[in-house]
Image (cartoon, grey):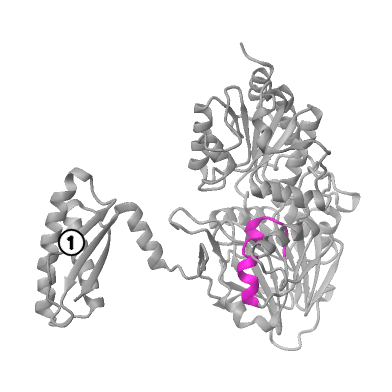
Protein backbone atom coordinates (compact mmCIF):
# COMPACT_ATOMS: atom_id res chain seq x y z
CA UNK A 1 0.00 0.00 0.00
CA UNK A 2 1.52 3.31 -1.03
CA UNK A 3 1.72 6.23 1.39
CA UNK A 4 0.89 9.89 0.63
CA UNK A 5 4.48 10.69 -0.38
CA UNK A 6 4.61 7.82 -2.94
CA UNK A 7 1.28 8.90 -4.47
CA UNK A 8 2.43 12.53 -4.68
CA UNK A 9 5.72 11.53 -6.38
CA UNK A 10 3.78 9.46 -8.95
CA UNK A 11 1.55 12.46 -9.70
CA UNK A 12 4.59 14.73 -10.12
CA UNK A 13 6.30 12.26 -12.45
CA UNK A 14 3.19 12.19 -14.68
CA UNK A 15 3.17 15.99 -14.85
CA UNK A 16 6.28 16.58 -16.95
CA UNK A 17 5.41 20.11 -18.01
CA UNK A 18 7.21 22.70 -15.89
CA UNK A 19 6.07 26.34 -15.85
CA UNK A 20 8.18 28.97 -17.55
CA UNK A 21 9.53 31.68 -15.26
CA UNK A 22 9.15 35.09 -16.83
CA UNK A 23 11.32 37.90 -15.54
CA UNK A 24 9.72 41.32 -15.68
CA UNK A 25 12.38 44.01 -15.31
CA UNK A 26 11.53 47.62 -14.56
CA UNK A 27 10.17 49.94 -17.23
CA UNK A 28 13.63 51.28 -18.01
CA UNK A 29 14.79 47.95 -19.39
CA UNK A 30 11.61 46.60 -20.97
CA UNK A 31 11.49 46.01 -24.71
CA UNK A 32 15.13 46.89 -25.31
CA UNK A 33 16.17 44.95 -28.43
CA UNK A 34 19.84 44.25 -28.95
CA UNK A 35 21.25 46.83 -31.32
CA UNK A 36 24.73 46.65 -32.74
CA UNK A 37 26.83 49.62 -31.75
CA UNK A 38 29.99 50.96 -33.28
CA UNK A 39 32.16 50.78 -30.18
CA UNK A 40 35.13 51.97 -32.16
CA UNK A 41 33.62 55.46 -32.29
CA UNK A 42 34.65 56.75 -28.89
CA UNK A 43 33.07 60.18 -29.21
CA UNK A 44 29.94 58.59 -27.71
CA UNK A 45 31.80 56.63 -25.01
CA UNK A 46 31.71 58.39 -21.66
CA UNK A 47 34.55 56.24 -20.36
CA UNK A 48 36.92 57.04 -23.19
CA UNK A 49 40.05 58.94 -22.25
CA UNK A 50 42.66 60.02 -24.83
CA UNK A 51 45.59 57.61 -24.98
CA UNK A 52 48.88 59.18 -23.98
CA UNK A 53 51.06 56.22 -24.91
CA UNK A 54 50.70 53.24 -27.20
CA UNK A 55 49.93 51.02 -24.24
CA UNK A 56 46.58 49.29 -23.83
CA UNK A 57 44.80 47.47 -21.04
CA UNK A 58 45.73 43.78 -20.76
CA UNK A 59 43.14 41.19 -19.71
CA UNK A 60 44.70 37.85 -18.73
CA UNK A 61 42.74 34.73 -17.66
CA UNK A 62 44.83 32.49 -15.38
CA UNK A 63 42.14 29.81 -15.00
CA UNK A 64 38.54 28.88 -15.67
CA UNK A 65 38.78 28.73 -19.46
CA UNK A 66 40.13 25.21 -19.99
CA UNK A 67 38.21 23.58 -17.15
CA UNK A 68 35.34 23.99 -14.69
CA UNK A 69 36.95 25.69 -11.70
CA UNK A 70 40.27 27.42 -10.97
CA UNK A 71 38.66 30.76 -11.88
CA UNK A 72 41.04 33.72 -11.89
CA UNK A 73 41.61 36.75 -14.12
CA UNK A 74 43.94 39.76 -14.01
CA UNK A 75 43.51 43.20 -15.58
CA UNK A 76 46.66 45.28 -16.12
CA UNK A 77 47.33 48.83 -17.24
CA UNK A 78 50.83 50.33 -17.02
CA UNK A 79 51.83 50.05 -13.35
CA UNK A 80 48.54 48.68 -12.00
CA UNK A 81 47.05 45.18 -11.79
CA UNK A 82 43.80 44.02 -10.24
CA UNK A 83 42.76 40.39 -9.88
CA UNK A 84 39.23 38.94 -10.04
CA UNK A 85 38.79 35.67 -8.08
CA UNK A 86 41.35 33.10 -6.86
CA UNK A 87 39.72 29.70 -7.17
CA UNK A 88 40.92 26.14 -7.21
CA UNK A 89 39.85 23.15 -9.26
CA UNK A 90 39.13 19.69 -7.91
CA UNK A 91 41.50 17.13 -9.49
CA UNK A 92 40.61 15.31 -12.66
CA UNK A 93 40.39 11.52 -12.69
CA UNK A 94 43.96 11.04 -13.90
CA UNK A 95 45.44 13.33 -11.19
CA UNK A 96 45.96 10.54 -8.70
CA UNK A 97 46.50 11.59 -5.10
CA UNK A 98 46.16 15.31 -5.89
CA UNK A 99 44.00 17.45 -3.58
CA UNK A 100 43.52 20.57 -5.70
CA UNK A 101 44.76 22.37 -8.80
CA UNK A 102 45.48 26.10 -8.47
CA UNK A 103 46.37 28.77 -11.06
CA UNK A 104 49.95 29.37 -12.14
CA UNK A 105 50.84 32.86 -10.89
CA UNK A 106 54.42 33.06 -12.18
CA UNK A 107 53.57 36.20 -14.20
CA UNK A 108 51.98 37.91 -11.20
CA UNK A 109 54.94 37.05 -8.95
CA UNK A 110 57.16 38.96 -11.36
CA UNK A 111 54.78 41.92 -11.14
CA UNK A 112 53.92 41.90 -7.42
CA UNK A 113 54.64 45.63 -7.12
CA UNK A 114 51.79 46.39 -9.54
CA UNK A 115 49.00 44.52 -7.74
CA UNK A 116 46.42 46.91 -6.26
CA UNK A 117 43.84 44.45 -4.98
CA UNK A 118 41.90 41.20 -5.38
CA UNK A 119 38.12 41.23 -5.94
CA UNK A 120 36.16 38.05 -5.15
CA UNK A 121 32.77 37.64 -6.84
CA UNK A 122 31.25 35.07 -4.43
CA UNK A 123 32.08 32.49 -1.78
CA UNK A 124 32.42 29.21 -3.70
CA UNK A 125 35.76 27.41 -3.55
CA UNK A 126 36.22 27.46 -7.33
CA UNK A 127 36.50 31.24 -6.85
CA UNK A 128 38.08 31.45 -3.36
CA UNK A 129 39.83 28.13 -2.71
CA UNK A 130 43.30 29.17 -3.91
CA UNK A 131 43.44 32.33 -1.77
CA UNK A 132 45.42 30.76 1.14
CA UNK A 133 47.94 29.29 -1.32
CA UNK A 134 48.37 32.32 -3.59
CA UNK A 135 47.99 35.31 -1.26
CA UNK A 136 51.28 34.79 0.64
CA UNK A 137 53.19 34.41 -2.64
CA UNK A 138 51.88 37.82 -3.77
CA UNK A 139 52.77 39.62 -0.51
CA UNK A 140 49.15 39.71 0.69
CA UNK A 141 47.37 42.24 -1.56
CA UNK A 142 44.07 43.54 -0.18
CA UNK A 143 41.00 41.35 -0.60
CA UNK A 144 37.64 42.92 -1.49
CA UNK A 145 34.39 40.93 -1.19
CA UNK A 146 30.80 41.20 0.00
CA UNK A 147 29.95 40.39 3.62
CA UNK A 148 29.05 36.68 3.40
CA UNK A 149 31.80 35.99 0.88
CA UNK A 150 34.37 37.61 3.18
CA UNK A 151 33.02 35.68 6.17
CA UNK A 152 33.64 32.38 4.38
CA UNK A 153 37.09 33.55 3.22
CA UNK A 154 38.01 34.61 6.75
CA UNK A 155 37.26 31.13 8.10
CA UNK A 156 39.55 29.57 5.51
CA UNK A 157 42.28 32.16 6.12
CA UNK A 158 42.18 31.33 9.84
CA UNK A 159 42.49 27.60 9.11
CA UNK A 160 45.75 28.36 7.29
CA UNK A 161 47.00 30.65 10.08
CA UNK A 162 47.58 33.70 7.87
CA UNK A 163 44.88 36.00 9.27
CA UNK A 164 47.40 38.45 10.76
CA UNK A 165 48.89 39.21 7.34
CA UNK A 166 45.65 39.23 5.34
CA UNK A 167 43.93 42.58 4.72
CA UNK A 168 40.19 42.11 4.11
CA UNK A 169 37.79 44.85 3.04
CA UNK A 170 34.04 44.21 2.93
CA UNK A 171 32.19 45.91 0.05
CA UNK A 172 28.49 46.40 -0.70
CA UNK A 173 27.08 46.00 -4.22
CA UNK A 174 26.53 49.79 -4.27
CA UNK A 175 30.18 50.60 -3.49
CA UNK A 176 32.79 51.94 -5.89
CA UNK A 177 36.50 51.16 -5.54
CA UNK A 178 39.39 53.14 -6.97
CA UNK A 179 42.29 50.72 -7.46
CA UNK A 180 45.15 52.38 -9.30
CA UNK A 181 44.01 53.21 -12.83
CA UNK A 182 40.79 51.20 -12.39
CA UNK A 183 37.41 52.21 -11.03
CA UNK A 184 35.49 49.11 -9.93
CA UNK A 185 31.77 48.87 -9.21
CA UNK A 186 29.38 45.94 -8.80
CA UNK A 187 25.95 44.55 -9.59
CA UNK A 188 24.09 41.95 -7.56
CA UNK A 189 23.48 38.57 -9.23
CA UNK A 190 21.52 35.48 -8.24
CA UNK A 191 23.54 32.33 -7.70
CA UNK A 192 23.37 29.25 -5.47
CA UNK A 193 25.00 31.23 -2.66
CA UNK A 194 23.90 34.66 -1.43
CA UNK A 195 25.89 37.86 -1.89
CA UNK A 196 27.24 37.09 -5.36
CA UNK A 197 28.19 40.03 -7.58
CA UNK A 198 29.34 40.84 -11.08
CA UNK A 199 32.15 43.36 -11.50
CA UNK A 200 32.37 46.47 -13.70
CA UNK A 201 35.89 47.75 -14.32
CA UNK A 202 36.21 51.20 -15.88
CA UNK A 203 39.63 51.64 -17.46
CA UNK A 204 41.31 54.42 -19.48
CA UNK A 205 40.47 52.46 -22.65
CA UNK A 206 36.95 51.16 -22.05
CA UNK A 207 34.65 49.28 -19.68
CA UNK A 208 35.12 45.61 -18.77
CA UNK A 209 32.16 43.62 -17.39
CA UNK A 210 32.74 40.34 -15.52
CA UNK A 211 29.48 38.50 -14.78
CA UNK A 212 30.76 36.22 -12.01
CA UNK A 213 28.62 33.07 -11.70
CA UNK A 214 24.97 33.95 -12.18
CA UNK A 215 21.43 33.09 -13.11
CA UNK A 216 18.28 35.24 -13.27
CA UNK A 217 15.84 34.00 -10.63
CA UNK A 218 12.47 35.78 -10.23
CA UNK A 219 11.97 34.19 -6.80
CA UNK A 220 15.41 33.58 -5.23
CA UNK A 221 15.73 31.86 -1.86
CA UNK A 222 17.07 35.03 -0.18
CA UNK A 223 14.36 37.15 -1.88
CA UNK A 224 17.01 39.51 -3.33
CA UNK A 225 16.77 39.75 -7.10
CA UNK A 226 19.59 40.64 -9.45
CA UNK A 227 20.27 44.33 -10.17
CA UNK A 228 18.39 44.34 -13.49
CA UNK A 229 18.49 48.12 -13.89
CA UNK A 230 22.21 48.37 -13.19
CA UNK A 231 23.00 45.53 -15.59
CA UNK A 232 20.84 47.10 -18.30
CA UNK A 233 22.60 50.45 -17.79
CA UNK A 234 25.79 48.76 -18.99
CA UNK A 235 24.27 48.47 -22.44
CA UNK A 236 22.12 51.59 -22.39
CA UNK A 237 24.30 54.22 -20.69
CA UNK A 238 27.86 53.04 -20.02
CA UNK A 239 28.51 51.38 -23.39
CA UNK A 240 30.29 48.26 -22.10
CA UNK A 241 33.32 47.47 -24.24
CA UNK A 242 33.66 43.74 -23.45
CA UNK A 243 31.67 41.19 -21.45
CA UNK A 244 33.16 38.10 -19.80
CA UNK A 245 30.27 35.80 -18.91
CA UNK A 246 29.70 32.46 -17.11
CA UNK A 247 29.31 29.53 -19.56
CA UNK A 248 28.70 26.57 -17.20
CA UNK A 249 25.16 25.80 -18.43
CA UNK A 250 25.41 27.18 -21.96
CA UNK A 251 24.34 23.82 -23.41
CA UNK A 252 21.05 23.71 -21.47
CA UNK A 253 17.98 25.25 -23.14
CA UNK A 254 15.40 27.36 -21.35
CA UNK A 255 15.76 29.10 -18.00
CA UNK A 256 17.22 27.83 -14.77
CA UNK A 257 14.51 26.62 -12.41
CA UNK A 258 13.73 29.02 -9.55
CA UNK A 259 14.79 28.32 -5.98
CA UNK A 260 11.17 28.86 -4.94
CA UNK A 261 10.11 25.77 -6.90
CA UNK A 262 12.77 23.68 -5.17
CA UNK A 263 11.75 25.00 -1.77
CA UNK A 264 8.12 24.08 -2.43
CA UNK A 265 9.09 20.56 -3.52
CA UNK A 266 11.28 19.99 -0.46
CA UNK A 267 8.55 21.34 1.82
CA UNK A 268 6.03 18.91 0.30
CA UNK A 269 8.38 15.96 0.79
CA UNK A 270 9.16 16.94 4.37
CA UNK A 271 5.44 17.30 5.13
CA UNK A 272 4.39 13.98 3.53
CA UNK A 273 7.28 11.76 4.67
CA UNK A 274 6.19 9.54 7.57
CA UNK A 275 9.70 8.60 8.74
CA UNK A 276 13.08 10.18 9.29
CA UNK A 277 14.51 12.48 6.61
CA UNK A 278 18.19 12.92 5.70
CA UNK A 279 19.01 15.76 3.29
CA UNK A 280 22.46 16.06 1.68
CA UNK A 281 23.41 19.34 0.03
CA UNK A 282 26.32 21.67 -0.59
CA UNK A 283 27.36 23.44 2.59
CA UNK A 284 27.40 26.76 0.70
CA UNK A 285 23.72 26.61 -0.34
CA UNK A 286 22.68 28.98 2.43
CA UNK A 287 19.35 29.83 0.77
CA UNK A 288 18.48 26.14 0.36
CA UNK A 289 19.43 25.48 3.98
CA UNK A 290 17.13 28.32 5.07
CA UNK A 291 14.26 26.76 3.11
CA UNK A 292 14.88 23.37 4.76
CA UNK A 293 15.04 24.89 8.24
CA UNK A 294 11.77 26.76 7.62
CA UNK A 295 10.06 23.54 6.52
CA UNK A 296 11.45 21.63 9.49
CA UNK A 297 10.05 24.27 11.82
CA UNK A 298 6.70 24.23 9.99
CA UNK A 299 6.37 20.44 10.23
CA UNK A 300 7.71 20.34 13.80
CA UNK A 301 10.88 18.36 13.08
CA UNK A 302 14.09 18.59 15.08
CA UNK A 303 17.15 19.34 12.92
CA UNK A 304 20.49 17.55 13.36
CA UNK A 305 23.57 18.71 11.41
CA UNK A 306 26.47 16.47 10.34
CA UNK A 307 29.60 17.63 8.50
CA UNK A 308 32.19 20.19 9.59
CA UNK A 309 31.86 22.49 6.56
CA UNK A 310 28.08 22.56 6.99
CA UNK A 311 28.33 23.38 10.68
CA UNK A 312 30.93 26.10 10.01
CA UNK A 313 29.06 27.72 7.10
CA UNK A 314 25.76 27.74 8.96
CA UNK A 315 27.44 29.39 11.95
CA UNK A 316 29.04 32.06 9.73
CA UNK A 317 25.81 32.72 7.81
CA UNK A 318 23.78 33.00 11.03
CA UNK A 319 26.31 35.35 12.62
CA UNK A 320 26.27 37.63 9.55
CA UNK A 321 22.48 37.62 9.28
CA UNK A 322 22.13 35.46 6.15
CA UNK A 323 20.56 32.53 8.01
CA UNK A 324 17.77 32.75 10.59
CA UNK A 325 17.65 29.79 12.98
CA UNK A 326 14.89 29.61 15.57
CA UNK A 327 16.24 28.82 19.07
CA UNK A 328 15.79 25.15 19.89
CA UNK A 329 15.49 24.02 16.26
CA UNK A 330 19.04 22.61 15.94
CA UNK A 331 19.96 19.66 18.18
CA UNK A 332 23.18 17.77 18.91
CA UNK A 333 23.90 15.14 16.22
CA UNK A 334 24.85 12.69 18.97
CA UNK A 335 21.16 12.54 19.97
CA UNK A 336 19.82 11.90 16.45
CA UNK A 337 19.30 8.18 16.96
CA UNK A 338 17.22 8.76 20.10
CA UNK A 339 14.75 11.07 18.36
CA UNK A 340 11.52 9.51 17.02
CA UNK A 341 11.85 9.08 13.22
CA UNK A 342 8.78 11.23 12.42
CA UNK A 343 10.32 14.13 14.37
CA UNK A 344 13.87 14.05 12.95
CA UNK A 345 15.51 15.79 9.97
CA UNK A 346 19.25 15.36 9.43
CA UNK A 347 21.19 17.87 7.32
CA UNK A 348 24.47 16.50 6.03
CA UNK A 349 27.35 17.00 3.63
CA UNK A 350 28.31 14.48 0.96
CA UNK A 351 26.04 15.32 -1.97
CA UNK A 352 28.97 14.61 -4.34
CA UNK A 353 29.82 11.18 -2.92
CA UNK A 354 33.08 12.44 -1.38
CA UNK A 355 34.94 9.53 0.20
CA UNK A 356 35.21 11.02 3.70
CA UNK A 357 31.91 12.91 3.75
CA UNK A 358 29.16 12.28 6.28
CA UNK A 359 26.69 10.84 3.73
CA UNK A 360 29.28 8.39 2.37
CA UNK A 361 30.05 7.20 5.88
CA UNK A 362 26.33 6.85 6.56
CA UNK A 363 25.93 4.76 3.38
CA UNK A 364 28.77 2.46 4.53
CA UNK A 365 27.19 2.12 7.98
CA UNK A 366 30.36 3.76 9.32
CA UNK A 367 28.97 7.00 10.80
CA UNK A 368 29.37 7.09 14.57
CA UNK A 369 26.08 8.96 15.18
CA UNK A 370 23.73 7.96 12.35
CA UNK A 371 22.61 4.49 11.23
CA UNK A 372 20.21 4.01 8.33
CA UNK A 373 16.90 2.43 9.31
CA UNK A 374 14.30 0.89 7.04
CA UNK A 375 11.84 3.67 6.27
CA UNK A 376 14.40 6.50 6.19
CA UNK A 377 14.12 8.92 3.26
CA UNK A 378 17.36 10.39 1.89
CA UNK A 379 17.20 13.47 -0.36
CA UNK A 380 20.27 14.42 -2.40
CA UNK A 381 19.69 18.10 -3.16
CA UNK A 382 22.55 18.64 -5.62
CA UNK A 383 23.56 17.99 -9.21
CA UNK A 384 26.64 15.79 -9.74
CA UNK A 385 29.80 17.70 -10.60
CA UNK A 386 31.34 16.22 -13.77
CA UNK A 387 33.42 13.19 -12.75
CA UNK A 388 31.52 12.50 -9.51
CA UNK A 389 28.61 10.54 -11.02
CA UNK A 390 30.02 7.11 -10.22
CA UNK A 391 30.76 7.99 -6.59
CA UNK A 392 27.26 9.44 -6.07
CA UNK A 393 25.46 6.42 -7.52
CA UNK A 394 27.60 4.11 -5.38
CA UNK A 395 26.36 6.04 -2.33
CA UNK A 396 22.75 5.80 -3.60
CA UNK A 397 23.11 2.03 -4.08
CA UNK A 398 24.56 1.57 -0.60
CA UNK A 399 21.79 3.63 1.00
CA UNK A 400 19.15 1.63 -0.86
CA UNK A 401 20.68 -1.67 0.29
CA UNK A 402 20.42 -0.44 3.89
CA UNK A 403 16.68 0.15 3.42
CA UNK A 404 16.48 3.88 2.66
CA UNK A 405 14.31 5.51 -0.01
CA UNK A 406 16.57 7.85 -2.02
CA UNK A 407 15.19 10.90 -3.86
CA UNK A 408 17.42 12.85 -6.24
CA UNK A 409 17.00 15.08 -9.27
CA UNK A 410 16.25 12.29 -11.76
CA UNK A 411 13.25 11.37 -9.63
CA UNK A 412 12.05 14.82 -8.48
CA UNK A 413 13.09 18.46 -8.74
CA UNK A 414 15.01 18.68 -5.46
CA UNK A 415 17.86 20.81 -6.79
CA UNK A 416 18.40 23.64 -9.22
CA UNK A 417 21.64 25.02 -10.61
CA UNK A 418 23.14 28.34 -9.64
CA UNK A 419 24.26 28.90 -13.23
CA UNK A 420 22.11 30.38 -15.96
CA UNK A 421 20.67 28.28 -18.77
CA UNK A 422 20.63 29.56 -22.35
CA UNK A 423 17.80 32.08 -21.92
CA UNK A 424 19.50 33.55 -18.83
CA UNK A 425 22.78 33.87 -20.73
CA UNK A 426 21.07 35.56 -23.68
CA UNK A 427 19.35 37.94 -21.28
CA UNK A 428 22.72 39.00 -19.85
CA UNK A 429 24.04 39.59 -23.36
CA UNK A 430 20.90 41.50 -24.33
CA UNK A 431 21.11 43.71 -21.24
CA UNK A 432 24.84 44.47 -21.47
CA UNK A 433 25.03 44.70 -25.29
CA UNK A 434 28.84 44.52 -25.33
CA UNK A 435 30.94 45.52 -28.29
CA UNK A 436 33.10 42.44 -27.64
CA UNK A 437 32.40 39.16 -25.89
CA UNK A 438 34.49 36.37 -24.32
CA UNK A 439 32.73 33.35 -22.78
CA UNK A 440 34.46 32.17 -19.57
CA UNK A 441 33.97 29.66 -16.74
CA UNK A 442 33.71 26.36 -18.57
CA UNK A 443 35.31 23.80 -20.81
CA UNK A 444 35.75 24.68 -24.48
CA UNK A 445 32.51 23.07 -25.72
CA UNK A 446 30.50 24.98 -23.07
CA UNK A 447 32.11 28.27 -24.07
CA UNK A 448 31.59 27.51 -27.77
CA UNK A 449 27.87 27.02 -27.10
CA UNK A 450 27.85 30.38 -25.27
CA UNK A 451 29.53 32.01 -28.28
CA UNK A 452 26.68 30.69 -30.47
CA UNK A 453 24.18 32.35 -28.13
CA UNK A 454 26.05 35.64 -28.52
CA UNK A 455 25.66 35.36 -32.30
CA UNK A 456 21.91 34.85 -31.84
CA UNK A 457 21.52 38.15 -30.01
CA UNK A 458 23.56 40.08 -32.55
CA UNK A 459 27.18 40.21 -31.40
CA UNK A 460 29.51 40.56 -34.38
CA UNK A 461 31.26 37.18 -34.87
CA UNK A 462 34.54 39.04 -35.41
CA UNK A 463 34.21 40.42 -31.87
CA UNK A 464 33.79 37.08 -30.07
CA UNK A 465 36.97 35.68 -28.51
CA UNK A 466 37.41 31.96 -27.77
CA UNK A 467 40.54 32.51 -25.69
CA UNK A 468 42.25 30.07 -23.33
CA UNK A 469 44.13 30.35 -20.07
CA UNK A 470 47.23 32.49 -20.56
CA UNK A 471 45.98 34.32 -23.65
CA UNK A 472 46.13 38.10 -23.45
CA UNK A 473 43.40 40.41 -24.72
CA UNK A 474 44.48 44.01 -25.32
CA UNK A 475 42.02 46.88 -25.16
CA UNK A 476 43.01 50.20 -26.76
CA UNK A 477 40.61 53.11 -27.20
CA UNK A 478 37.58 50.81 -27.13
CA UNK A 479 39.07 48.21 -29.51
CA UNK A 480 39.91 44.72 -28.28
CA UNK A 481 42.42 42.39 -29.95
CA UNK A 482 44.26 39.18 -29.07
CA UNK A 483 47.93 39.79 -28.31
CA UNK A 484 50.64 37.66 -29.90
CA UNK A 485 52.34 36.88 -26.60
CA UNK A 486 50.93 34.54 -23.93
CA UNK A 487 51.39 34.09 -20.19
CA UNK A 488 52.55 30.73 -18.83
CA UNK A 489 49.69 28.89 -17.11
CA UNK A 490 50.82 25.44 -16.01
CA UNK A 491 48.77 23.29 -13.66
CA UNK A 492 50.02 23.85 -10.10
CA UNK A 493 49.12 20.74 -8.13
CA UNK A 494 48.47 20.75 -4.39
CA UNK A 495 49.24 17.44 -2.70
CA UNK A 496 49.03 17.53 1.10
CA UNK A 497 51.46 20.18 2.31
CA UNK A 498 53.21 20.32 -1.05
CA UNK A 499 52.31 22.99 -3.60
CA UNK A 500 53.75 22.93 -7.07
CA UNK A 501 56.29 20.24 -6.19
CA UNK A 502 54.32 17.49 -7.95
CA UNK A 503 55.42 17.32 -11.57
CA UNK A 504 54.12 15.47 -14.60
CA UNK A 505 56.61 12.66 -13.98
CA UNK A 506 55.16 12.00 -10.54
CA UNK A 507 51.60 11.92 -11.90
CA UNK A 508 52.73 9.62 -14.72
CA UNK A 509 54.29 7.22 -12.22
CA UNK A 510 51.12 7.22 -10.10
CA UNK A 511 49.06 6.36 -13.16
CA UNK A 512 51.37 3.44 -14.01
CA UNK A 513 51.26 2.27 -10.40
CA UNK A 514 47.44 2.37 -10.38
CA UNK A 515 47.06 0.55 -13.71
CA UNK A 516 49.92 -1.98 -13.72
CA UNK A 517 51.42 -2.21 -10.24
CA UNK A 518 55.08 -1.92 -9.25
CA UNK A 519 58.25 -4.02 -9.50
CA UNK A 520 61.01 -3.29 -7.00
CA UNK A 521 64.32 -4.61 -8.35
CA UNK A 522 67.08 -5.06 -5.77
CA UNK A 523 70.73 -5.27 -6.89
CA UNK A 524 73.79 -5.56 -4.61
CA UNK A 525 76.96 -4.49 -6.46
CA UNK A 526 80.65 -3.91 -5.74
CA UNK A 527 81.33 -0.20 -5.18
CA UNK A 528 84.44 -0.12 -7.42
CA UNK A 529 84.04 -2.91 -9.98
CA UNK A 530 80.20 -2.67 -10.22
CA UNK A 531 80.04 -6.49 -10.39
CA UNK A 532 76.95 -8.19 -8.99
CA UNK A 533 77.32 -9.52 -5.45
CA UNK A 534 74.65 -12.16 -4.99
CA UNK A 535 71.36 -12.81 -6.78
CA UNK A 536 69.01 -10.11 -8.03
CA UNK A 537 65.84 -9.80 -5.96
CA UNK A 538 62.50 -8.66 -7.48
CA UNK A 539 59.41 -7.88 -5.41
CA UNK A 540 56.03 -7.28 -7.11
CA UNK A 541 52.91 -5.47 -5.90
CA UNK A 542 49.68 -5.18 -7.90
CA UNK A 543 51.51 -6.59 -10.92
CA UNK A 544 50.27 -10.08 -11.70
CA UNK A 545 47.86 -12.69 -10.33
CA UNK A 546 49.37 -14.56 -7.38
CA UNK A 547 49.33 -18.05 -8.99
CA UNK A 548 51.37 -16.77 -11.94
CA UNK A 549 53.75 -14.53 -10.05
CA UNK A 550 56.49 -17.07 -9.19
CA UNK A 551 57.10 -18.10 -12.81
CA UNK A 552 56.96 -14.54 -14.13
CA UNK A 553 59.33 -13.24 -11.46
CA UNK A 554 61.83 -16.07 -12.09
CA UNK A 555 61.93 -15.13 -15.79
CA UNK A 556 62.32 -11.44 -14.98
CA UNK A 557 65.20 -12.14 -12.58
CA UNK A 558 66.94 -14.16 -15.29
CA UNK A 559 66.43 -11.33 -17.83
CA UNK A 560 67.57 -8.71 -15.31
CA UNK A 561 70.85 -10.58 -14.75
CA UNK A 562 71.51 -10.90 -18.50
CA UNK A 563 70.77 -7.24 -19.14
CA UNK A 564 73.01 -6.14 -16.27
CA UNK A 565 75.87 -8.21 -17.68
CA UNK A 566 75.32 -6.61 -21.11
CA UNK A 567 75.52 -3.19 -19.48
CA UNK A 568 78.89 -4.01 -17.89
CA UNK A 569 80.19 -5.15 -21.26
CA UNK A 570 79.31 -1.75 -22.74
CA UNK A 571 80.40 0.35 -19.75
CA UNK A 572 83.03 -0.91 -17.32
CA UNK A 573 82.01 1.35 -14.45
CA UNK A 574 78.55 2.77 -15.08
CA UNK A 575 77.11 5.32 -12.66
CA UNK A 576 74.15 4.56 -10.42
CA UNK A 577 71.83 6.77 -12.52
CA UNK A 578 72.90 4.96 -15.71
CA UNK A 579 72.30 1.56 -14.10
CA UNK A 580 68.81 2.53 -12.98
CA UNK A 581 67.81 3.99 -16.36
CA UNK A 582 69.16 0.96 -18.24
CA UNK A 583 67.41 -1.57 -15.99
CA UNK A 584 64.08 0.31 -16.17
CA UNK A 585 64.12 0.32 -19.98
CA UNK A 586 65.25 -3.29 -20.25
CA UNK A 587 62.73 -4.72 -17.78
CA UNK A 588 59.94 -2.58 -19.21
CA UNK A 589 60.41 -4.36 -22.57
CA UNK A 590 60.56 -7.78 -20.92
CA UNK A 591 57.38 -7.32 -18.84
CA UNK A 592 55.52 -6.18 -21.93
CA UNK A 593 56.70 -9.25 -23.85
CA UNK A 594 55.76 -11.62 -21.02
CA UNK A 595 52.29 -10.39 -20.02
CA UNK A 596 51.70 -7.17 -22.00
CA UNK A 597 51.91 -4.97 -18.92
CA UNK A 598 54.15 -2.07 -18.06
CA UNK A 599 54.45 -1.75 -14.28
CA UNK A 600 56.33 0.99 -12.47
CA UNK A 601 59.91 -0.33 -12.17
CA UNK A 602 61.91 0.88 -9.19
CA UNK A 603 65.57 -0.25 -9.09
CA UNK A 604 67.10 -0.25 -5.60
CA UNK A 605 70.92 -0.49 -5.78
CA UNK A 606 73.13 -1.21 -2.78
CA UNK A 607 76.87 -0.60 -3.20
CA UNK A 608 79.22 -2.66 -0.99
In the image, taking residue 432 as reference, residue 105 lies left or right, namely left
Where, quadrant-wise, is the N terminus in this rendering?
Answer: top right
Quadrant for residue 504, please give it: bottom left
Q: Position of residue 300 (x, y in %)?
A: 79, 27
- The residue nearer to you, when weighing 100 against 561, is 561
Report the residue that reaches farthest toward the top.
1
What element does badge 1 sit on? strand
- Classify residue 148 as left or right of residue 512: right
Residue 494 on image: x %, y %: 52, 64
Q: Residue at x 64, y 43 (%)?
A: 253
Q: Main secondary structure of the magenta part?
A: helix
Q: Is residue 132 magenta-colored?
A: yes
- Residue toward you, 156 or 210: 156
Residue numbers of the magenta segment: 120-138
- What residue is shown with label 1? 537
Query: How many residues crowd mark 1 within 10 Å: few (<14), some (14–19), many (20+)?
Result: some
Query: Who is closer to the viewer here, 576 or 559?
Result: 576
Q: Is residue 526 left or right of residue 211?
A: left
Query: Where's residue 267, x and y in %?
Result: 75, 30
**For residue 383: magenta?**
no
- At x 58%, y 53%, the residue is 446
* Residue placed furthest toward the bottom: 53
**In which quadrant of the rendered image does the C terminus lie?**
bottom left
- Residue at 63% from the left image edge and 14% from the top image edge: 2
Q: Quadrant of residue 342?
A: top right
What residue occupies the far right of the structure in this picture?
A: 27
| 605 sits left or right of 290 in the view | left
Amino acid sequence: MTNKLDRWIEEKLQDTASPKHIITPSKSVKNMPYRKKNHHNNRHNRNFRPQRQNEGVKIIPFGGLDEVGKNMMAIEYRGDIIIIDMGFQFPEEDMLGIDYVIPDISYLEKNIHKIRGVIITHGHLDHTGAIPYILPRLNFPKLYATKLTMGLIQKRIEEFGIQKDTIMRVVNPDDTLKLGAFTCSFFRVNHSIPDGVGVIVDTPHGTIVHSGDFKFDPTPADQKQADYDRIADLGHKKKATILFSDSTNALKPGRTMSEKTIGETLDKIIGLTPGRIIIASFSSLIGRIQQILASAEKWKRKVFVSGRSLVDNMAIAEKLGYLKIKPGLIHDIRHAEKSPPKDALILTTGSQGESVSALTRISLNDHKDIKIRKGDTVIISATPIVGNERAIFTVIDNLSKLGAKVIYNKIMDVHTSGHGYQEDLKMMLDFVRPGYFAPIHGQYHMRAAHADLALEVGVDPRNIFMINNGDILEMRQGRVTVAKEKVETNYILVDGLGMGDIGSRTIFERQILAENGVLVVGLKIHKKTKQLLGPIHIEAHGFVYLDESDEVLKELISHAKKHYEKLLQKHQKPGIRNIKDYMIKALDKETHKLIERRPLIVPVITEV
